[in-house]
Image (cartoon, rainbow, N blue to C red):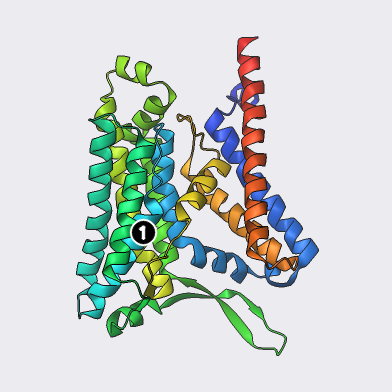
Amino acid sequence: MNKAFWKRKEPLNDTQLLMTITIVIFFVMYILAMILFGGGFLHVQQVFDMLNDNASLIIVTCGLTIVMIGGGIDISVGAVTSLVVMSCVLYLNKGGNIFVAVLLAVGIGLAFGLVHGFLVSYLEIQPFIVTLAGMFFARGMTTILSVNPQKVSHVAFNTFREKRIVIPWLGYTANNGNKIPARMELGVVIALACVILVWMLLKYVRLGRNFYAMGGNQQSALMLGINVKRTRFLSYILSGLLSGIAGFVFMMHTGAGNSTNAAGMEMNAIASAIIGGTLLTGGVGNVIGSFFGTMILTTIKKIVVASGLNDPWWQSITTGGMLCFFILLQSIVLGKRAKKRKT
């Protein structure tokens, strides 16, 4: 047999290790939920429902992962998503075109990304302050557009958003004997496409590798000839773009706009990215891990409800506890790896 087969494989880097831990924890958590609670956890539709409800959050988390890998932060993503939803709803209700509504969503997201990227990268203002201002501005603009909830009355759009991808062989048989096929919203396809594209960007494209280099050590990145300002600028543009797409997907899921839409989404996106193995200090992270981080947060919420703890604060408590657990786990794992490298 070829001796190369027996050669020791290269150890996982920090990004791969943290991503692997996240994926393992998700599957262990979900299997335990199947064993302990049964019910919906036994059906594939439960997973599809989790994806349907969180497609927009997955997209936002993809953008935030890029920014965090580069050593930045963007807390405006939820407010931008909300502004996109309200703008597109009002536009469609005035007889607008669906394609133009998509362009409007992307345009709003890009506008915020451009402003944030310029202020952070070229004027060197702290990203937390810049995106905090962007969050307040987007929330204020959403309220100006409409204080009251707005439901989409556009017939063509409603017909489009109600379409489902039906997978009969992944369905289940109800208690009355009826066969219920698995159903997935179109927004999930968009979300998964965003995950794959961002993963390919970070893994195979030079710009993606520049994000890691910039977040790992900015001075080293400069010595390698990387244009740090332009790279950071592009990370915020991508975050804004994905926030715009997320807003349209959010509207596809809810079919309505509200001034409180996507409230807290930025915090959930940050938590998902951290649970997925993305470090706030930058240089380490993977969008696949962020995807499973989102799924872990959703699974926790499902488990809390299945446990009979329907009060909303229980979900917040368990989310906070899980976030602390993962931060502690990352610190321990990376600390031990750092010691091994020194020895």
Q: What amino acid does circle 1 point to? A: Thr
Say whether residue 57 is visible.
yes
Q: In the shown orientation, is residue 196 left or right of residue 7?
A: left
* Residue at numbered disc 1: 81
Image quadrant in which you'd find residue 151 = bottom left
In which quarter of the view is residue 147 placed? bottom left
- Give the position of the N terminus as an image quadrant: top right
x and y, in percent, of residue 39 in the image:
73, 72
Residue 72 drawn at (x, y percent) = 39, 35
Query: Residue farthest to the right?
Result: 36
Residue at the image position 31 percent from the left and 83 percent from the top? 153
Viewed as shown, does residue 179 lie left or right of 90?
Answer: right
Figure check: 78 above or below 275: below
User: Percent position (x, y) of residue 299?
Assistant: 64, 58
Q: Where is 79 relative to 39, above or below?
A: above
How crowded pointer 1 is (Cα within 10 Å; few <14, some 14-19, many 20+) is rated as many
Q: Is residue 246 left or right of residue 144?
A: right
Question: Is 263 above or below relative to 126?
Answer: below
- Spot the residue most to the top: 343
